[in-house]
Amino acid sequence: MRQAYRTALVTGASSGIGESFARLLAARGADLVIVARRAALLDGLARELVERYRVAVEVVAADLTDPAQRGEVEERLRAEPVELLVNNAGYGAFGAFADLDLDDQLREIELNVTALMRLTHAALPGMLVRRRGGVLNVASMAGFAPSPGSATYGATKAYVAAFSESLHAEVAGRGVHVTALCPGFTRTEDDGAANLLWLRRADVARAGLDAVSAGRALCVPGAQYKAALPALKIMPRTVLRAAANRMWQQAADSQ
């Protein structure tokens, strides 16, 4: 059964795919809670969405790597439930693991994994009681293959994909949809034309919203990435590692 969500909380909503989620949901008539660190960008987006779509938009400026600020968002989800939680906030550092700052990579795990898990845990029990709701977790194609040069990022996205698919199975038949959105390379700063490699952020957000509404466990936007996923699953890991390492070395040499 497809679900139309009347209320939603979107993390990482100040730019990129998160901003596209917010715009698409507002266009569909959903009242929003938008969460990110940059209050000024959130305020501007909120004003635009209220004026254009006549929906309610609540701004929550919070750094989800900070336990106290994250805790306020968790409490908001418990006290004033939403029908859809979009766990979009995340980032990745590029470089050899041994050369990157460890604390920065731990913050990456805190945002990409811990915050996502904690917000899901805050929202999901109430959805199950009401037998209605959705959780859309933004993973990545990087979660399905070795990621030299972004080892921590790839590992966090593998967690998100596995976590989401497991939750999807746990709540099946209980009125709640959990979906992992796994895009490939996506233009996050503008909505330029899509091509063989790069996806448009609005197309990615739309695919994810349609997938969670329809109750699909996994969403891979873009025909090129849909075609690549089966190959990633059956290709020998030694071949996959070698190919990924060549790509990483070429990228590192070009910097």
Image (cartoon, rainbow, N blue to C red):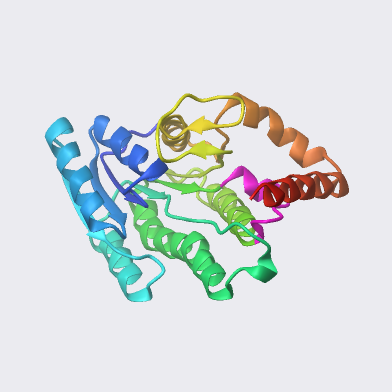
Image label count: 0
Residue 56, by quadrant, is top left
Q: Provide the residue span drawn in magenta.
A: 140-151
Compare residues 199 and 35 and report the one nearer the observer. 199
- Which residue is at a point 81% across and 45% down the rendered structure image? 240
Residue 62, by quadrant, is bottom left
Q: Position of residue 171 (x, y in %)?
A: 50, 50
Compare residues 118 and 3 and report the one nearer the observer. 118
Relative to 26, say whether 157 is above or below. Answer: below
Q: Position of residue 83 (x, y in %)?
A: 31, 46
| Magenta region includes residue 142 | yes
Q: Position of residue 245 (x, y in %)?
A: 78, 50
| Magenta region includes residue 132 | no
Q: Quadrant of the N terminus?
A: top left
Relative to 16, say whether 72 is above or below. Answer: below
Compare residues 117 and 23 and report the one nearer the observer. 23
Residue 1 visible in image: no
- Which residue is at a point 30% across and 41% down the rendered structure image? 22
- Which residue is at a point 68% across and 62% down the rendered structure image? 96
Q: Position of residue 147 (x, y in %)?
A: 69, 52
